Amino acid sequence: MTMRLYQRPKPVFQYLILVFFLGLSPILLKAQNTLKGRVLEYGTKAPIPYASIFLTNTTLGVTADEEGKFSLKIPDGSFDVIVRMLGYESVNFSINTNELPASGYQVQLNTMDQELEEIELEVERDPIWYRNLEYFKWYFIGSSKNGREVVIENEKKLLLDRDTNPNILQVSAKEPILLDNPNLGYKVEFLLVDFQYNFKEETILYKGYPLFIPYKDLGKSKQKKIAKNRAEAYNGSLQHFIHSLYLGISQDEGFVVRRLKKIPNPEKPTKTEMDEARLIFKTSTSLEVKDSIQTHFLSKAHLSDKIEILDQNELDPEKLLDRHENGRVFILFEDQIHITYLNETLPREYVGASAGRDKKSPQISRLRITDPKVEIFFSGSFDDPLGIMVEEYMAWERVGDLMPWDYVPIRGK
């Protein structure tokens, strides 16, 4: 699935499109679906044996057989699939497990043009390049405990461009970025399509395709530590919230949901009042009257038309949902949602970035539905990548805290 993420670092604000989960402990997957098909060469229709097929944002993948056929059990959800083979151009396409064709997919790969390999020269980077690299790490990987430990193993493959537009840092790569996340125990091959950081507007946009590869052959103590770190990264995340909504257990999981309403700003004069004030200001010869009009009306023209108020009554999470008889679940909600996660407090790193916050404060996030009908799945994913926008804590956690979709903790059932 293409990830498009848009955020304002000050305050932290983002469209968080994908969250990925992986676990060392046994996982419970609602995997009643089969992704199947055949990989063929475009034009000749000859089978391509041993091509790799995998779901992005997961650890799930399979290799085609000698006839190019493949079959993979996958959980409910909306995913991007990538098919690749040496000597051929990769193909990606989106699927929804509610709409998988019974006959499977026929994937045709184009042969790659055989060009002379480019000779790479080791070019010495200047201080500006390294400064831009730090910007990229900060806003792409994040500043959390986990994010600070992530290593980009091939960082010199990154193409950092701030010459085209001095106000925008653009980052791309011709090959997957190799990320090593020791705290969460996985390596990530992240095919970064584009990254842009706007210094003037303080906004970020990036999109790409990650594949998660878990660490292997770990000792028991290391497994235990990584499992703990993964659980902490999962708890309170957007993935966790959506998953618990789907199961109807969000309150039991520690989420408190309230409604954020927008009402007319009582401090801002109405349009009629502003028009009358401008007319009086224009026609009056009294400085006292003009000063009064300026203070009580004209100076308030810049105020927002509406303000947000938080309903102190806890909202029944089921009122956010539309459950169908066939088991499909949709979020239908117009107002913004205020989410408090009670089972964890704000980490030290977040408090350090947010002066004045109590270290014992719970994790608070905001969520807004931008699509009138977003389907959610057991895995915690959702079908419209631009359908949910989050702010505050959920937006602060970035790639360094993300795990594959196929991690869901076992419930005591």
Image: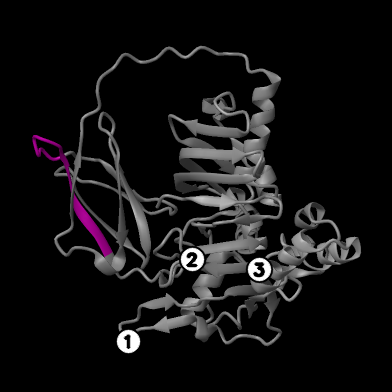
Of labels 2 and 3, earlier in sequence is 3
Question: Label 1: few (<14), some or many (≥20) within 10 Å?
Answer: few
Q: Which residue is mark 3?
A: 305
Amino acid type at mark 3: Asp
Of residue 112 and residue 35, the one placed in the foreground of this image is 112
Q: Position of residue 313 (x, y in %)?
A: 68, 87
The numbered mark at residue 116 is none
Q: Is residue 196 left or right of residue 117?
A: right
In the picture, residue 306 is in which quadrant?
bottom right
Residue on which disc 1 sits: 325
Q: Which residue is mark 2?
A: 370
Q: Which residues are magenta?
A: 34-47
Name the image quarter holding residue 364.
bottom right
Point 45% across, 70% down: residue:
28
Say if the magenta span includes residue 45: yes
**Could you tell me how far apart the alpha carbons at marks 1 and 2 are, in whole angstroms?**
25 Å
Looking at the picture, the colour scheme in use is one colour
